[in-house]
Amino acid sequence: DGRYPLLLGTPAIRGTVLMPGTSTEGVPNVLILPIDSQGRERWEYQTQSDATGKFGLTVPNGTWTLWARTWGNGRTFTYSTKVTGFQVTSGALAPAGEITLRMRAPNLFGTVIKPGGGTPIPLSDIDINI
């Protein structure tokens, strides 16, 4: 009849994305991006936090780094700090536990304006690589 059963497994990595500082408030709808031991961002394993900031994802066995990245506009915080060097063995985090990713407060503020004038450009996206 064209229907196929889909079996969902237990995620290898579970965790929570939290607001900056010491907040215990979860951050919804941010991208969780795994990075492999070669430093490659592995988009095929990405996920997104739920309405409470919780996430789960499955990656192959190995050494991994995770970080949370914002998207869209209207955010008052920036990418999380990276959690590095944790192991996934036999399809599970070793040692067992959960990962906490904490978003960072921005430390640079400014206004993007049109050339030759002081008119602000709304919804501008600025990336700075140092």
Image: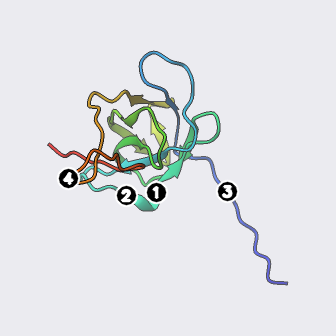
Evaluate if marks 2 and 1 touch, with contact meaning CB atoms under 8 Å apart.
yes
Task: Tell us which disc is closer to us: 3 or 2.
Answer: 2
Residue furthest bottom as drawn: 1
Q: Which residue is mark 3?
A: 8
Q: Is residue 89 above or below residue 94?
A: below
The amino acid type, in three-letter code, at marker 1 is Tyr
12 on left or right of 50: left
Query: Label 3 vs label 4: CA separation?
Result: 56 Å
Q: Residue at x 42, y 49 (%)?
A: 123
- The amino acid sitting under disc 3 is Leu
Label 2: element kind:
loop
The residue type indicated by label 4 comes to: Gly
Which callout, 3 or 4, points at the residue further toward the start of the chain?
A: 3
Residue marked by disc 1: 45
Examine the image and state in which quarter residue 85 appears: top left
Closer to the chain start, of discs 3 and 1, is: 3
Is disc 3 in contact with disc 1, using a CB cutoff of under 8 Å?
Answer: no
Residue linked to disc 2: 42
The image's mark for residue 116 is: 4
Looking at the figure, which quarter contains the C terminus? top left
Give the CA distance from mark 3 to mark 2.
Answer: 20 Å
Depth order, front residue of 23/58: 23
**What is the C-alpha distance between the residues marked 3 and 1?**
15 Å
Foreground residue, 78 or 38?
Answer: 78
Residue extending furthest toward the left: 130
| Label 4: element kind | loop
Q: Residue at x 28, y 27 (%)?
A: 107
**Upstream in sequence: badge 2 or badge 4:** 2
